[in-house]
Amino acid sequence: MSKPKLAYYLAGGCGGCDIAVVDLSEALIDVALAVDIVFWAPTVADVKYKDLEAMPDGSIDVGLISGNVRNSEHEHIAKVLRNKCKVLIAFGICAACGGIKGLVNLHTTEELLDKAYVNTFSTDNPNKELPQTTCVVDGKYELTLPTLMYAKPLDEVVKVDYYIGGCPPHYEHVKAAFTALLSGQLPPPGSWITMGKAVCEVCGRNPVLKGKPKRFATEVKRTIDGAPSEDGCLLEEGYLCLGPVTQGDCGSKCPAANIPCRGCGGPIPGVKDYSLRAISSIASMFDNEDLIDQIPDPVHLFYRYTLPSSFPYKRLKS
Amino acid sequence: MAWEPRLIVIACHWCTYAGADLAGSLRYSYPPTVHIVRVPCSGRVEPEFIAEALRRGADGVFIGGCHFGDCHYKEGNYKAIRRFKLLKRSLTDLGIQPERVQLEWISGSEGKRFAEAMTEFDAKIRELGPNPMKGGA
């Protein structure tokens, strides 16, 4: 029997999800032996786009795409991969929900280009030159660059079979996902590959797991305000932790290191709009409504990883 | 045809819905643009409900609950106002007109207040104009 074929594409991401796969360590050898990697651009394998485009439709068993769809090149390759792959997976929170880089949707492209190429303190660009999508070199070679678009989660461009959260996914999660994939034990299409528990359910700080009642938070703290207790719930102490609505496949690593959950794992099953559910869940954890006004910058907290896939941006910008 | 607003009113069963009922019994008139959805408690209202209404083209969403201390489930309305305040702050930051959503406490005996609140809300939304997200769904 021939080995299953695997393709991997890094779209508008940082490469962290690629590293998460490499982080499989010894298990990576088993995975690499069990599959045939036919495409892994632009980080690992050197396969050209035209070679990918020449492959027959449906010839690749599993395609992973990490990173959001941010320009015309991402969109094109995502569509090509959709045709070539039997199963397409949005790998990591950027592909699944837009990710932290999805926060660009709060700004216009002009603003962003201005900041990146003109107005930064260390930039020397007196003629205000900006990257162009086409350029002719030596009078004959036409070079092109992809066009920037609003950041979109992958499922706004193509149909996605499975989602994997995390920024990046924890390597144990990646291992479990690959095991499920290779053994064919997958949930129904359209679902997240997750164990289905929230961060709180695997968190060592959760008082409920220790048989104690959960108390309301009586103050709002930022991570720079003092230090949390050794094993108390961060939310009870006033640190804005998104553990209640986030998938806990990471094993609650951040709260264990005194950092409140930021929600990179993606929504727990049953939640459609992560950011709105996070607003609902965190708001009801507070003792009184005056504390709500003290929450600094709710948009960058609750929409940190999910702005392009959450209301209202999902509809406004697509 | 001239634009007519579509207003979604999410009313708690024990107070605001009873208030709407009383407004009817007492023959108080309020705008026909109001569409009432009954929920057990204002604490049942997830921000997702409000978003869904706006996404599907409602021009305004009004949530009615019991006055503090009157909640049939004791603390549902306290949770509602916390969620609502945080949602409204977030929507404002994201560029949605916060006036399109409103939370108010209307008890079962305040039929007149219900009719007034609906008339005021209708007038306010007419001033704001159609929901810019309309048609995007």
Image (tube, coloured by chain):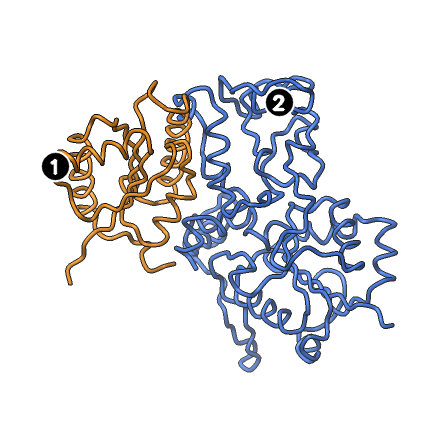
Looking at the rendered structure, the kind of residue marked 1 is: Tyr
Crowding at dot 2, Cα within 10 Å, few <14 / some 14-19 / many 20+, comes out as many
Give the chain letter for blue.
Answer: A
Disc 1 secondary structure class? loop
Residue A180, position as x, y percentages in the image: 76, 54
Q: Which mark is residue B28?
A: 1
Crowding at dot 1, Cα within 10 Å, few <14 / some 14-19 / many 20+, comes out as some
Disc 2 secondary structure class? loop
Q: Is residue B52 above or below residue A45?
A: above
* Residue in the picture at 24% in, 50% down: B6
Q: In this view, does A167 lie above or below A279?
A: below
For disc 2, the marked residue is A233
Residue A254, position as x, y percentages in the image: 67, 32
Q: Residue furthest bottom?
A: A140
* Residue in the picture at 83% in, 57% down: A31
Image side of residue B108 versus residue A201, left or right: left
Q: Is residue A233 above or below residue A176?
A: above
Depth check, front residue: A281 or A158: A281
Q: In this view, does A256 lie above or below A302?
A: above
Depth check, front residue: A79 or A196: A196
Give the chain letter for orange.
Answer: B
What chain is tagged by disc 2? A
Q: Which of marks 2 and 1 is in front?
A: 1
Looking at the rendered structure, the kind of residue marked 2 is: Cys
